[in-house]
Amino acid sequence: MNNNRLNYLAKRRTDISHKNLDIEILKKGSKESEDHHITSRTNSEFMIPLCKSCHEFVSDEQNSIPIVHRKNSFIIAFKSISGLLRLLAHQIDFIVERFIQNDKNSN
């Protein structure tokens, strides 16, 4: 792999690691779904549907892994699952906030 590509990927990993999860975008969701390769496109054809913004987030999680480890489907899968669990935790927080708001409005 050439140096320009390696430098680009190193910068991309740094950008991703400093990226905050934009909760407002995830709350809105998307009517469009995209297929996500759990263990990356090169390791398996196993896919799950995710909304577009969630797919971008989980893919960025995968892309934060150094290139030398991307052929290891277990590492990629665990990183995908980690991203999915973070998304799930934020969705649960969102649901709890809605219940709290509804409870305040009913009193």
Image (spheres, helix red, strand yellow):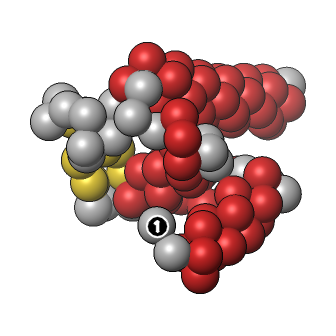
Extreme-front residue of the structure: 2
Q: Quadrant of the C terminus?
A: top right
Q: Residue at x 37, y 25 (%)?
A: 73
Q: Residue at x 33, y 40 (%)?
A: 40
Task: Find residue 94 and report its image quarter.
Answer: top right
Density class for disc 1 (Cα within 10 Å; few <14, some 14-19, many ≥20) is few
Q: Position of residue 89 (x, y in %)?
A: 67, 24
**Residue tagged by mark 1?**
1
Q: Position of residue 52 (x, y in %)?
A: 39, 59
Q: Secondary structure at mark 1?
A: loop
Extreme-left residue of the structure: 45
> Going by the image, does 54 lie left or right of 50?
right
Examine the rendered structure and indicate whether residue 105 appears above or below residue 30.
above
> Going by the image, does 82 lie left or right of 11?
left
Q: Is residue 68 visible?
A: yes
Q: Position of residue 104 (x, y in %)?
A: 85, 30
All told, the count of numbered labels is 1
> Going by the image, does 102 lie left or right of 29?
right
The foreground one among 88 and 43 is 43
Examine the rendered structure and indicate whether residue 70 appears above or below residue 72.
below
Q: Is residue 88 visible?
A: no
The foreground one among 105 and 12 is 12
Q: Amino acid at mark 1?
A: Met
Q: Residue at x 46, y 67 (%)?
A: 1
